[in-house]
Image: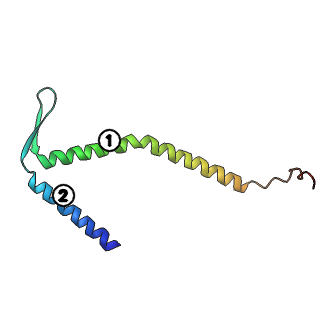
Amino acid sequence: MRALLWASRIVIFLFLFAFAIKNTDPVSVRFFFDAAWQAPLVIVALAFFAGGTVLGVLALLGTVFGLRREAARLRRELKQAQSAPPSVNQAPPPGA
């Protein structure tokens, strides 16, 4: 299984490397106020991919922290329930 994982990683790397070599033509990215950035296409694509990844992670941070807080609360409740002695004040079932 480990060999298959490494083989797939190598194939993906070679595919992306070939993509990078084929897309070295300069492109201009025009911003507001006549600002422009000229760079190879692969650098522009990589920059936007990285920016999208960062924005996606930032969008999930609130959810992740909320779930961690809930998990900590549930762990505290479980620890408290396990440390409490069992209740013996229960009435016997009817007919017993």
Identify the residue at horizontal 61%, vertical 49% (top origin). 74
Q: Secondary structure at mark 2?
A: helix
CA–CA distance in space, label 2 to label 1? 22 Å
Residue 16 is tagged as 2
Residue 28 image position (x, y, % from top left)? 9, 38
Image height of 34 relative to 46, above or below: above
Question: Which callout, 2 or 1, points at the residue further toward the start of the chain?
Answer: 2
18 on left or right of 89? left
Residue 2 figure quarter:
bottom left
- At horizontal 51% and vertical 48% (from top left) the residue drawn is 68
Residues packed near mark 1 inside 10 Å, few (<14), some (14 to 19) or many (20 plus): few
Looking at the image, is 2 positioned above or below residue 51?
Answer: below
- What is the number of callouts on the image? 2
Disc 1 marks which amino acid?
A: Leu
**Residue at image point 46% right, 42% down:** 63
Tag 1 secondary structure: helix
In the shown orientation, is residue 10 left or right of residue 27?
Answer: right
Which quadrant of the view contains residue 7? bottom left
Residue 96: image quadrant is bottom right
Along the horizontal axis of the image, is 2 left or right of 35? right
In the rendered image, residue 15, in percent from the top left (x then y), is placed at 18, 60
Of the residues shown, which amino acid type is indicated by label 2? Leu
Applied colour scheme: rainbow
Callout 2 environment at 10 Å: few (<14), some (14 to 19), or many (20+)?
A: few
Foreground: 70 or 41? 41
37 to the left or right of 74: left
Tell me the residue at 26%/43% (across/down). 51
Which of the numbered marks, if any, corresponds to residue 55?
1
Q: Residue 66 bears which disc, if any?
A: none
Residue 83: where, in percent of width, then height?
A: 72, 56
Name the spot of residue 59 as percent of width and height, x first. 38, 40
